[in-house]
Amino acid sequence: MRTILIWCLSLICVFSQLPAQISPQSQATKNNSATIVRGAYLQAIAPHSITIRWRTDVPTDSRVLAGKTMNYGISVQNTTFTTEHEITLSGLESNQQYFYAVGTTTEILQGDSTNKFISAPAQGEFIPVRVWATGDFGNGSAAQAAVRDAYLNYDSKPTNLWIWLGDNAYASGTDSEYQTNVFDMYPEPLKRFPLMPSPGNHDYGNTGFASGITLTTDAPYFSIFTTPQNGESGGIPSFSPKYYSYNYSNIHFVSLDSYGSLQDPGSPMVEWLKSDLANHNQRWTIVYFHHPPYTKGTHDSDTEIELYSIRQNIIPILEQHGVDLVLSGHSHSNERSYLLHGHYGLSYTFSPSMMVQPNHTNFVKSPPYTGTVYAICGTSGQSPGPSQNDAPMPCMFFNDFNTNCSMVLDIDRDLLSAKYLTSAGTVLHEFSITKTGPSSIIEYGEVSYEITYDSSDQSVLLTCFSTKKTSMKISLCGLKGELISNFTDIPASLPQGYSMQKIKLPELSKAMYLIVLQLDDQLFSKKLLMGK
Ligand SMILES: [Fe+2]
């Protein structure tokens, strides 16, 4: 507590006009007394805050200037001298482009027109989102540079998020390897793309799956990155730097630790994951971690404990909560599954019944939104292949063991599209997921909803999108309005965002019935043929 108090006293956060002696036009990249040797890089982005970090060669105090123009206007400083600078800007407007500059309290060390970011949208504010995903990249190779350049030259859409699929710095995730193979490799992307990493085995120095030192946070990864572990960007706080979640537009992202955290039932990461997935109301759920549950690339998910542990302990939880897309690396391959549900055994146990729908490229998910696509991109620097002798994995639709790639995700309301972008700048493979059901575009009222009847278990599925918390009553009536059931065991309100409620029906003889829905003071009804 005393340490925190001292830190708080030394941190002076002042929103003020830019001091007159600092001219934005006189920005230098370094001064005589201190040089930036790492960053700046962008962490823990949220609708109203972001953390900016950088390293200097000698200790200095820290200051970030920021604003919607390069005249800045916001100034946040910390007078403690350090080489590891970390400043959090708060009070930002959501979904706005900000320019920023970093340096000391008397001098800008870095800050030009490329030092900029877009703050995250506010809850309920839906914007098209571009995500760049890279896996197994940090080896300092020409291939890593080519994959980077292919993405930077791909198009002009701004990058909202950059997610890392682990094995970020080879061979052992040391600080100097992070310097050479990551920070020196991506100076421009790191200045502009808010980064949400996950760790791989090499970031832990390959010290052993979920054992010994791997279970600690001693690896340099944990001192280099600041992740939103306290729920500051939405999601349930994990209070762990190893795994965390956050919302962005209408997407819930989860970054897991597939190497340095226990995965047994009841372990902290597993219990947090269950709670987190059960308590968000976003349209999409994207989960990423390093070790893939299904692969026959440079690794074999039938024989390696890290991989079948994920498949047996984590995948059933993800599928139970309707996760849409799982991204991984580790195998130096590009592999992408069918829309799957229920494949928790070895590769030979795969059967067509585990494919949720026959379409294999452009998926359509309707309520209750069953099915998950698993994609591997472990080729963003490391040489691809060779694959296992019994490749490909039967549950995989797309398999490439020869090409360096990154992944480009675009999510716009009810459409998610994903591309494997090669180091040559071509699209090797693409797929999409479209969601049907209640629309988030509401022209009248505050709720859109869809009611469907499931004859297999005599239930009704109520799927809703609500712009605010809304009181709810639902009842079952005959066609003349006579009450049959009030369903008193369902929640009394809808949360803001998306929600789904499965309602078990009483014994009914086959006939037409009315489902009557009261949302605040508005009544809706739907006539359905139900019963048996
Ligand atoms: Fe790996």
Image (cartoon, rainbow, N blue to C red):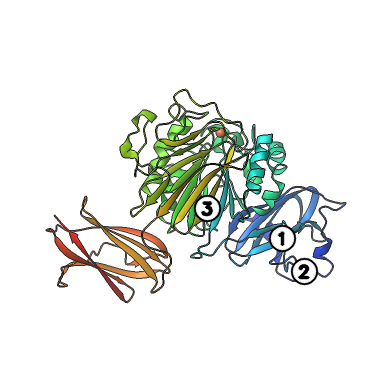
Residue nearest the observer in this picture, 515 or 105: 515
Q: Is residue 79 visible?
A: no
Name which residue type carries label 3.
Asp
Name which residue type carries label 1.
Tyr
Sequence-wise, the earlier of marks 2 and 3 is 2
Sequence-wise, the earlier of marks 1 and 3 is 1
Beta carbon at label 1 within 8 Å of ligand 1:
no
Choose mark 2 or mark 1, whichever is in front: 1
Q: Which residue is mark 2?
A: 18
Mark 3 residue crowding within 10 angstroms, few (<14) / some (14–19) / many (20+): some
How far apart are labels 1 and 3 at the CA level?
Answer: 26 Å
Q: Position of residue 409 (x, y in %)?
A: 53, 49
CB atoms of marks 1 and 3 within 8 Å: no
Which quadrant does the C terminus fall into? bottom left
Helix, strand or loop for disc 3? strand
Going by the image, does 350 lie left or right of 293?
left
Q: Which residue is mark 1?
A: 100
Q: Residue furthest right?
A: 32
Sequence-wise, the earlier of marks 2 and 1 is 2
Q: Position of residue 394 (x, y in %)?
A: 40, 32
Residue at image point 47% right, 32% down: 295
Quadrant field for ligand 1: top right
Residue at image point 61% right, 61% down: 119
Q: Which residue is mark 3?
A: 410
Choose mark 2 or mark 3, whichever is in front: 3
Name which residue type carries label 2.
Leu
Mark 1 residue crowding within 10 angstroms, few (<14) / some (14–19) / many (20+): many
